[in-house]
Every structure is written in structure tokens, then in C-alpha cells.
Image (spheres, rainbow, N blue to C red):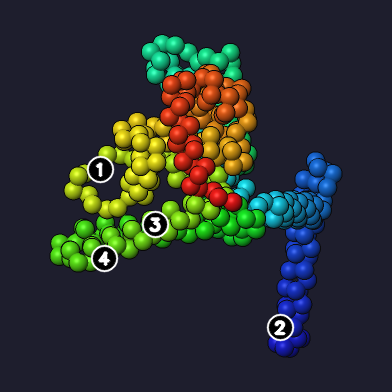
Amino acid sequence: MNSKTTVALMIVIIFLVFFFLSKNSTHNLNISNNDVSSHDNIAPKEIKNKSLKSIKTELEAINHKTINSKKASEQKAKKLTYLQAYRNKKFFSTCFWKLHDFQNNIDPLEKFRNYIIEKRHGTALGGGGLQEKYFMDHFNKCKEFLGDKENDIGEVSDYLDELFQSMKPISEEERDLSAYLELHIKRYKVVTRIYEEKEKENKSADVLLELNKSLEIVLFEIIDNLKTNSSPDVFLDNYFNFVEPIRSPFDTIPRLEDFILTNIQNDTNINDEYYLEILIELATPLFACSLGYPCDENSLLTYKYCVYQSNKNACGKTVEDFYLNDLISPNQQVDVNKVLDYFMTNYAQI
């Protein structure tokens, strides 16, 4: 046997040995796998396929749920009107502290109870349980806006604002509200420019004078707008938070409130400015109610009086009933009527 034959024979032997060992290793591996599968009665390949199928099904379900949820949100948004979107945005602004407590595992109702006891020096909530009911009704409505507990309050607020900005006013009332809001933004921009100029080291008296003149023009535009504006929301925004913090006597920025107060003083002959501001705050909701603002016993206004201002007499009543029978004295009613007469004569002349 020559050397070439010997080498060839050795190669064949090595190949056979390698083949035998490889086959035996595979056999042992199969036994091991079969031993594991005998526990589960499912082969490894079947386990893998089932897992992938299960994951795919779950992902499809989540995706389907997300799409449906998105469609539902879009359909709900489409059904909203400009006015409803505006009121939703305003309503949610009354929810912040309750939802913040809720997300931090603090019982908002218990916190409110303690607040009332402290405020009343030991006296608990009254109103025959109605105050707690109003509180919880409001809280539950707030949670509806929040949706999932993990949703961020700020993000929900931003969403409601963006949703409102995307809406178009259709009715006359909505167009009036939109026109007022545009003037309000215009006013805010001029006021911001005035304060920015005041903060400059080299501020210009001439620039400030011109900006003040521009602001006065905007304020008169707002007053003219109010004369024919049919939106009750506008009047609540303008007057309900009428009393502003006392400003410095050196602050010469024109205020809408100054013009309105002067006009009402001249018409009603009520010269006490502080008392007149109180009368305006009392008359404004009644005027808004007369224009169609929600003032029933389940309205946000009733909630504010019943819970926020902790007046148990407001619970379960319409705003008008509460005002006329509980809040306003007979003598005060005479002066409130003067302001109401001014509103009815000068504003919302539809």
C-alpha cells in the first residue's frame, strides 16, 4: 500500500469516526429535548411558534384597541362644538388640585373635609350631605377628562386647549365669544409689551406713552364689542373675577375695569368703588343666566358656591334661587338691580 493510499484510507476513517460521533451527539440532544418536552407535552418548536403567535395576537389586540380609542376620541372631538370645547377647557382648570392629590394617592374628599373643619374652626361640612355629593360629582367629572390614572394633568390641559384652538365658531354666540377672545389676546400682547418696556434700563417714556395709547384703543374696542356680544361666557370672564389685586399708585397702565367702573358709576350714581365692585360680581352671574349660561342646580356655578365657597345654602338650588333667596339681602337687591339694569341697557344688545 503506497503512501497515497494510506493517506486516503486515514481520511476515510477520520470522516467515519466524525460522522459517528456527530450522529450520536445529535441523538443525545434529541433525547434531552424529548425529555423536556415530555413535561409540557409540546415540542420546543411548537412552544416557540405558540409564543410568537400569542405575542402577535396581543400586539394586534393592543393596536386594535389603540386605533379604536383614537377613533373614539376623534369622533367625540368631532361632536364637540366650539362653545363646549371652551367650557371643557375652563372646567378642567377647576380640577387641578383634586387630580394632583388623586394621582399621589391622597384622598381629595378627606383633604377637603379637613380644610373645611380648619376654615370653620371645627365645624364639619353641612348641607345634609349635599356638599360632599357636589364635591364628588365634580371630582368624578374631572377624572373623566383625565382618563387613565397615568395621564399627565398638564398634558390633558394642553390637549383640551389645542382641541379648542382647532375648533371653528359656528353659531352667533360662538362667533361673539371668538371675537372677544381675539381682542383679549390683543390686549394681553400690548400689556406684555408695556411691562417689558418698563423693565428696560433705558426705557423710553415716548414708547410707553404710545403703548398706553394703543392699549386704550384696544380697551375701547372691547367695550364696543360687549355692547353687541351675545355670549354669556364673555361676561363671566370679564366681570366674575372683577376685583383685581390692589396695584401700585405708580402703575399707570390703563385697565378695562377702570373704564367699566366709571361708566357704571355715572349710570347708577353709586360712588363707593369697593361696594360697586361687589355689586358687579353679584350682578354678573345673574346677567349671564339671563343670556342662557348654565345656572341649574347641577351647574358649575352652583358647585362653586356650594363647595368652593362652602355655602351650604347654595346646594341643590339654581343660581337665581340661591342669589335671590339666600345670598343677596333685600336692601342690597335694590343696588344689584341698578347694575343689572345697566348691563341690560348697555350690553348684549342682540
Which numbered dot is residue 210? Answer: 4
- Give the amino acid at mark 2: Val
Q: CA distance from mark 4 to mark 1?
A: 21 Å
Q: Are the residues tagged 4 and 1 within 8 Å (C-beta)?
A: no
Judged left or right of residue 159, residue 282 is left
- Mark 4 vs mark 1, foreground winner is 4
Instruction: Locate residue 118, reporting x and y percent.
Output: 39, 17
Categorize mark 4 by other alpha carbons within 10 Å: few (<14), some (14-19), many (20+): few
Looking at the rendered structure, the secondary structure element under dot 2 is helix
Number of residue marks: 4
- Give the amino acid at mark 1: Arg
Categorize mark 1 by other alpha carbons within 10 Å: few (<14), some (14-19), many (20+): few
- Mark 1 vs mark 2, foreground winner is 1
Residue topped by disc 1:
247
Residue topped by disc 2:
7
Categorize mark 3 by other alpha carbons within 10 Å: few (<14), some (14-19), many (20+): few
Residue for point 78% across, 71% down: 16
Looking at the rendered structure, the secondary structure element under dot 1 is loop
The residue lying toward the viewer, choosing from 14 and 322, is: 322
Instruction: Locate residue 205, reporting x and y percent.
Output: 17, 63
Which numbered dot is residue 285? Answer: none
Give the vertical position of 199 relative to 263 (above or below).
below
